[in-house]
Image (tube, rainbow, N blue to C red):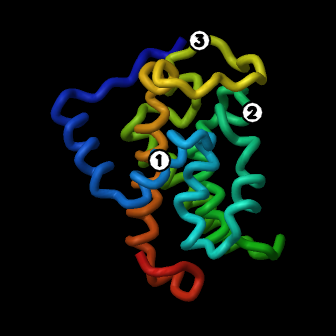
Amino acid sequence: MKEEYTRDEEQEKSLEEQLEKSPHARKAMGYFRDGYNCSQSIVLAFSEEMGLDEKSLLRLSSSFGGGMGRLREVCGSVSGMFMVTGYLFGYDDPKDYETKKELYGRIQELAGKFTHINGSIVCRDLLGLSKGPDEPVPEKRTEAYYSKRPCPKIIGISAMILEEYLQEHREETEGLVSDF
């Protein structure tokens, strides 16, 4: 099991305040509480900016919950953040190496920001689990479930990081996304 990553009290308070100020973080955390998985919560929070229908986004991102189908690998909220980034900054020409390079740089930057705050992008590390895959049966969403998991806050952090990133790179997405 990976050593647990911790923040001091002051860092935790600051993070809570930042999450409260972030419209996308609040949306994403609300979607998770409504029962959507971590990845779905992120893409749904940014559906307006992408201009895609919610049903397609929800289905596309549905297998990434629980660190990819409860395999406990890359956190679903991180995968959701990457999906939104890929849609907004990605490429569709396999010979477009420059855009591919830029996109991968963006993904690594976002992963670095997430890791700086949380210590890892791996679901099992974030949850403090020692083993890999869980049973494929998702847990029922109860108050006990929410009280023992850091997932809502982690999802909020992913949304906040992406919101800030998109604001910083607004000129590059002009015409692609709605204003923030």
Residue type at the position of mark 3: Ser
Residue type at the position of mark 2: Gly
Residue lying farthest to the right in this orientation: 94
Label 3: few (<14), some (14–19) or many (≥20) C-alpha neighbours in 10 Å? few
Identify residue for label 1: 30
Identify which residue is drawn at 66% across, 68% down. 87
Tell me the number on the disc at residue 130: 3
Identify residue for label 2: 69
Identify which residue is drawn at 62% across, 40% down. 37
Instruction: Give the image location of residue 91, x and y in percent.
Output: 73, 72
Disc with the residue nearer the chain's start (1 vs 3): 1
Disc with the residue nearer the chain's start (3 vs 2): 2
Identify which residue is drawn at 27% across, 51% down. 18
Q: CA distance from mark 3 to mark 2?
A: 17 Å
The residue mark sitting in front, 3 or 2, is: 2
Does 110 sit left or right of 100 as displayed? Answer: left
Q: Is residue 143 above or below residue 23?
A: above
